[in-house]
Each structure stands twice: as structure tokens, then as C-alpha cells.
Image (cartoon, rainbow, N blue to C red):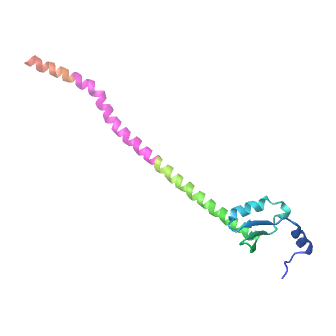
């Protein structure tokens, strides 16, 4: 069966440059090359070279659907990575708050002891003088 296109379209296709790509070309690369084509060739088929004498046509619509699926998967992956980074950031913020609380709890008693060291030293000297006076 012949494609359901007019003779002029087939003739125009025969005159155009055919995009032939190797079999191992990634879908994203095929789509990128598709968008670089001129607008009048945008929906013309792309030929995929399977082996030395075998070729296959790539359906543009299936290619666009595949690229759309790849794009959706990439968005999901980015969303998951963003969520992971957000959870990690929240964990680090909680850890920082806990460490600040622990540092505050240690600093208060140490500050109290250091603040009263002079008073204790003076009290010790007075007590020592009193013992010396009783001797």
C-alpha cells in the first residue's frame, strides 16, 4: 500500500535531504536533530540505519511521545532529588538547633562556675587567713 500522501508530497520528499542516523543514536539526540531541521522538514521521516544494508523509518509522532515520556521521567527524578535535598536540609537544621541547645546548656553552668571563681578564691583566702589566725 502506498502512503496516503499526494504525489507532490512524495516527489518533494524524494528531493529533500534525508536524515540518516546510526542505530545506536539516543532518542533525545534524535529529537534534538529533529528540532534543528527546517520547519518544512519537521514531520518528514527520519531514517535509522540498522545494519550495512538495512534501514528503518522512525515515526515522528512516536519519537515525540518517547521524548515526552523521557521529559516526564526527568521531571520526576528532579522532584525526587529536590525532596531529598529538602529533607537533608531540614535534618541539618534540626541538628544545628540541637547542638545550639546543648552548647547553651553547657555554657550556662560553666559561666556560673567561672563567674563565681573569684568569689570562691576570695572566700578561700579569707578562710585560710582565719585558720592561720587560730593557729
The residue at the point 72 percent across, 68 percent down is 63
Give the main secondary structure of the magenta stretch.
Answer: helix
Q: Which image quarter is the C terminus in? A: top left
Q: Position of residue 100 (x, y in %)?
A: 41, 41
Residue sitting nearer the eye, 59 or 12:
12
The residue at the point 47 percent across, 46 percent down is 93
Q: Position of residue 125 (x, y in %)?
A: 19, 21
Highlighted magenta segment, given as a residue range: 93-122
* Residue 132 visible in image: yes
Q: Position of residue 108 (x, y in %)?
A: 34, 35
Tell me, yes or no, whether the highlighted magenta stretch contains residue 117: yes
Q: Is residue 67 left or right of residue 131?
A: right
In the picture shown, does residue 78 fall above or below 95? Answer: below
Q: Is residue 123 left or right of residue 51?
A: left
**Which residue is the extreme one toward the left?**
135
**Which residue is the extreme one toward the top?**
133
Residue sitting nearer the eye, 119 or 30:
30
Q: Which image quarter is the N terminus in? A: bottom right
Residue sitting nearer the eye, 96 or 71:
71
Residue sitting nearer the eye, 92 or 17:
17
Q: Quadrant of residue 134?
A: top left
In the picture shown, does residue 23 fall above or below 77? Answer: below
In the picture shown, does residue 115 fall above or below 130? Answer: below
**Which residue is the extreme one toward the bottom?**
1
The residue at the point 28 percent across, 31 percent down is 113
Q: Is residue 122 left or right of residue 19?
A: left
Q: Position of residue 24 (x, y in %)?
A: 67, 66
* Residue 58 visible in image: no
Q: Quadrant of residue 44?
A: bottom right
Tell me, yes or no, whether the highlighted magenta stretch contains residue 88: no
Q: Quadrant of residue 133?
A: top left
**Which residue is the extreme one toward the front?**
52
Amino acid at each position: 500500500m502506498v502512503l496516503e500522501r499526494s504525489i507532490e508530497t512524495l516527489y518533494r520528499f524524494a528531493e529533500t535531504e534525508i536524515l540518516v542516523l546510526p542505530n545506536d543514536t539516543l532518542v533525545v539526540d534524535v529529537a534534538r536533530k529533529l528540532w534543528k531541521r527546517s520547519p518544512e522538514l519537521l514531520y518528514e521521516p527520519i531514517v535509522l540505519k540498522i545494519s550495512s544494508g538495512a534501514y528503518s523509518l522512525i515515526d515522528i509522532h512516536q519519537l515525540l511521545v518517547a521524548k515526552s515520556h523521557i521529559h516526564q521521567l526527568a521531571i520526576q527524578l528532579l522532584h525526587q532529588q529536590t525532596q531529598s535535598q529538602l529533607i537533608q536540609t531540614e535534618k541539618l537544621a534540626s541538628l544545628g538547633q540541637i547542638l545550639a541547645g546543648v552548647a547553651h546548656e553547657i555554657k550556662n553552668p560553666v559561666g556560673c562556675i567561672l563567674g563565681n571563681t573569684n568569689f570562691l578564691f576570695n572566700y578561700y583566702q579569707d578562710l585560710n587567713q582565719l585558720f592561720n589566725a587560730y593557729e
